[in-house]
Image (spheres, grey):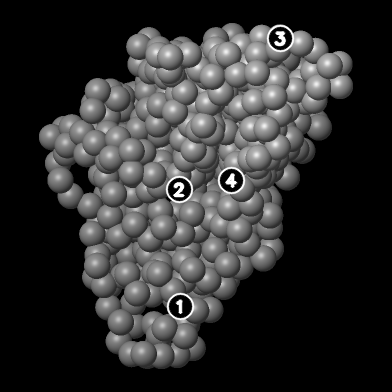
């Protein structure tokens, strides 16, 4: 609940920072809604001032990110996924502050990115910092990171349910009861604070949704298939342009956002609707405010502007751009269908609503989150059936066309595969895989007793405990065999026992695998306070890995 409250307050501060930066750079609350207008602070430049706002903004956030938190560059969510998978949920405290400032200046200065990635990283950094302060184990630290992410999404978009599933489906990849309960508490707390500050109403004000005939479902099938392809194409375009920027830039990294800002400024000069997040433009397009040709131009322009913003080193999310691209695809599809078969598209805006969720599902491959977030963003229940249909098809097409997603591709380029079974072991606790503790050996058990015991039950290692149940060590079968071959006398279980660590139940199987390897691999006890209560072997780990493969 504390993490949720922090994420909620962080989201409110972040929104204020973006609005303040936008007013500072443009003189307007949202310049995408005032396209081609002059800056009242610089009236002599007319609309040409947008050519220079990304450059000035880059001169501010470029050195800030380079000097204090380089992980604040980019769209944020992959960095959180990396922290959970590779660093046990550890995120440096300064990331929250640097990410908030850098993203606010980037978006306020014209960066065509969203605010969900930054607030996920900000909330996650708050959760990680709190967990590290109270010295939580890694398994619980990861949950606090997910709580921060859920709180950020819930507070930013007034979507508590989608915030929960975003964190569980994308960040944790785990729907365990303890994870679910904690994340729900954080999301509810953050959403309650957000509603107190900004009111309780859907994030997007959109037209009424209706299904006029059963034939329209066939049209939504086609839209879902198209959206899956567009989602994958949008993801590929993002990283293609980022690669081009990496290849062409040879100067210092702190200067890259400012130098590349001139290119972004050129795009904004030609198409000012791309300035910032662009929700007013999205709402107008869905409401039927643009012709078919201009809607297609907005679709291509958003992919180019967002990819360029990320490629030059900008800081911002890709969720809002995914919604924008999806809305333009759906609106264009609806307008074209209305022109050919008006009965199948009485309201082209309905296709835009479905297209928003379907393209995000195609890009991120998170179908549960996509359905829930569109439902909560619009507050429109009648959207559910065609939305589920299109999103399921889009996610399926995405799976067929691409192994990675818009979030995991960045990690794969670093050599980190979150879908690999050995990586998934990091999200499973020792308790979930451990077996029963074998009957312990007594400290004074003789060599004959040990030989008979190992021959009878086939274990490769057995624990030795004293009269109080405290672990004295572990005897391995190979040590008993050597003692028999040497015809040693006076050998007891206590004399052959090796000191080993006792695994904690909430440790990850990835950590347990390392401990098993260091200690001979025969088996390790699981318990607390020196008293074993369970037993973990490599066979248990293999069973867990096999279960992961079957689920995949």
Q: Which mark is nearer the camera, 2 or 4? A: 4
Labels 4 and 1 touching (C-beta < 8 A): no
Which element type, helix, strand or loop, lies under badge 1? helix
Sort mark 2 into few (<14), some (14-19) or many (20+) by Cα contacts within 10 Å: some
Image coordinates for residue 292, horizontal then vertical, percent: 49, 70
- Residue tagged by mark 4? 544
Q: Is residue 497 above or below residue 181?
A: above
Sort mark 3 into few (<14), some (14-19) or many (20+) by Cα contacts within 10 Å: few
The residue shown at (61%, 48%) is 543
Gap between marks 2 and 4, in whole Å? 19 Å
Sort mark 4 into few (<14), some (14-19) or many (20+) by Cα contacts within 10 Å: many
Kindly identify which numbered label has been placed on residue 220: 1
Kindly identify which numbered label has been placed on residue 169: 2
341 relative to 7 in the view: left or right: right
Which element type, helix, strand or loop, lies under badge 4? helix
Gap between marks 2 and 3, in whole Å? 57 Å
371 relative to 5 in the view: left or right: right
Kindly identify which numbered label has been placed on residue 71: none
Number of numbered callouts drawn: 4
Residues 291 and 171: in front is 171
Which element type, helix, strand or loop, lies under badge 2? helix
The residue shown at (38%, 61%) is 371
Labels 2 and 3 touching (C-beta < 8 A): no
Residues 549 and 395: in front is 549
The residue shown at (60%, 19%) is 445
């Amino acid at each position: 609940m504390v993490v949720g409250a922090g994420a909620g307050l962080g989201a409110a501060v972040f929104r204020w920072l973006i609005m303040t930066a936008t007013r500072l750079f443009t003189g307007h609350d949202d310049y995408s809604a005032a396209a081609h207008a002059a800056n009242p602070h610089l009236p002599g430049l007319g609309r040409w001032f947008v050519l220079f706002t990304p450059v000035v903004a880059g001169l501010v956030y470029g050195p800030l990110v380079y000097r204090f938190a380089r992980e604040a560059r980019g769209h944020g969510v992959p960095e959180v996924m990396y922290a959970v998978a590779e660093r046990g949920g550890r995120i440096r405290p300064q990331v929250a502050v640097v990410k908030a400032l850098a993203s606010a200046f980037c978006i306020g200065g014209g960066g065509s990115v969203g605010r969900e990635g930054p607030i996920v990283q900000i909330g996650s950094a708050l959760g990680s910092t709190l967990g590290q302060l109270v010295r939580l184990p890694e398994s619980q630290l990861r949950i606090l990171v997910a709580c921060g992410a859920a709180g950020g999404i819930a507070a930013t978009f007034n979507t508590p349910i989608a915030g929960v599933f975003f964190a569980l489906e994308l960040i944790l990849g785990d729907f365990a009861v303890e994870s679910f309960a904690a994340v729900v508490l954080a999301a509810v707390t953050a959403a309650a604070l957000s509603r107190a500050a900004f009111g309780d109403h859907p994030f997007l004000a959109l037209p009424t949704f209706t299904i006029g005939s059963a034939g329209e479902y066939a049209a939504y099938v086609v839209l879902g298939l198209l959206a899956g392809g567009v989602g994958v194409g949008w993801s590929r375009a993002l990283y293609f342009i980022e690669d081009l920027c990496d290849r062409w830039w040879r100067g210092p990294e702190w200067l890259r956002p400012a130098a590349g800002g001139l290119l972004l400024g050129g795009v904004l000069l030609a198409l000012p609707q791309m300035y910032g997040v662009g929700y007013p433009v999205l709402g107008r397009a869905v409401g039927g405010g643009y012709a078919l040709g201009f809607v297609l131009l907005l679709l291509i322009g958003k992919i180019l502007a967002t990819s360029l913003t990320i490629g030059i080193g900008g800081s911002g999310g890709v969720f809002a751009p995914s919604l924008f691209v999806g809305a333009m695809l759906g609106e264009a599809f609806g307008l074209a269908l209305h022109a050919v078969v008006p009965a199948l598209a009485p309201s082209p805006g309905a296709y835009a609503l479905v297209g928003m969720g379907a393209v995000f599902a195609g890009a991120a491959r998170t179908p549960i989150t996509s359905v829930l977030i569109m439902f909560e963003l619009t507050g429109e229940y009648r959207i559910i059936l065609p939305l589920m249909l299109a999103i399921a098809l889009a996610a399926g097409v995405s799976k067929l066309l691409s192994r990675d997603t818009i979030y995991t591709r960045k990690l794969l380029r670093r050599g980190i595969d979150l879908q690999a079974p050995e990586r998934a072991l990091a999200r499973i606790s020792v308790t979930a895989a451990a077996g029963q503790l074998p009957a312990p050996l007594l400290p004074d058990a003789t060599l004959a007793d040990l030989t008979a015991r190992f021959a009878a039950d086939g274990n490769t290692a057995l624990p030795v405990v004293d009269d109080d149940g405290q672990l004295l060590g572990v005897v391995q079968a190979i040590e008993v065999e050597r003692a028999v071959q040497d015809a040693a006398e006076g050998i007891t279980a206590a004399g052959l026992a090796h000191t080993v660590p006792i695994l904690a139940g909430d440790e990850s199987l990835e950590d347990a695998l390392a401990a098993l390897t260091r200690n001979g691999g025969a088996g390790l006890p699981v318990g607390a306070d020196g008293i074993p209560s369970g037993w973990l072997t490599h066979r248990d780990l293999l069973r867990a890995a096999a279960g992961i493969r079957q689920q995949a």
